[in-house]
Image: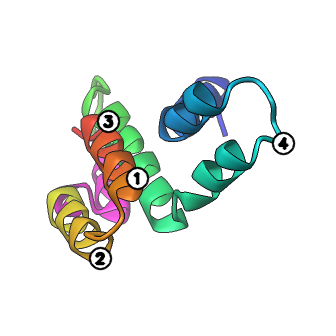
Amino acid sequence: MKPNSYSATVAALCLLAGPALAEAGADPGHPQRVAQLEITPLDVTALAMRGRECRQLLGTTISDVASDYSAELALGRLRCDALTTDTAELRRKYAQSPRVLESIDVAGEAAP
């Protein structure tokens, strides 16, 4: 993983955990903080990561055929064209969980 990619990954995870960090204060063992951190499901975190990677790829300058092909393969592997549909599916799946819906909204803001 590239250094910039790692930093962006950490930033995305912090965005998802933000409400837990803000509400529970600095105490890492605070029960409210622990519960909020555990509530972000892996599929929502994965969606946020995909959105970030897609946005990064879409902002890449294509300088030759090889980089164009590489970007095209990555966009297909990440299924960037399906982010909107996948977000809607997760919203339906977690419709009864306001905190997860908030995380999905944050993830959607990071999408292309």
Proximity of marks 3 and 1: CB atoms separated by less than 8 Å: no
Residue 110: numbered disc: 3
- Density class for disc 2 (Cα within 10 Å; few <14, some 14-19, many ≥20) is few
- Magenta segment includes 80: yes
Residue, x 41% and y 42% (percent of image)?
53
Proximity of marks 3 and 2: CB atoms separated by less than 8 Å: no
Per the image, label 3 sits on a secondary structure element best described as loop
First reached walking from the N terminus: tag 3 or tag 1: 1
Proximity of marks 2 and 4: CB atoms separated by less than 8 Å: no
Question: Mark 1 = which residue?
Answer: 99
Please tell me how many numbered marks the rendered image carries: 4
Position of the C terminus by quadrant: top left
Q: Which residues are magenta?
A: 67-82
First reached walking from the N terminus: tag 4 or tag 3: 4
Inspect the image, locate mark 2, and give the three-letter code of the amino acid beneath it.
Lys
Q: Disc 3 and disc 1: Cα gap in Å?
A: 17 Å
Question: Mark 4 = which residue?
Answer: 29
- Magenta segment includes 40: no
Question: Mark 2 = which residue?
Answer: 93
First reached walking from the N terminus: tag 3 or tag 2: 2
Proximity of marks 4 and 3: CB atoms separated by less than 8 Å: no
Q: Nearer the viewer, mark 3 or mark 1?
A: 1
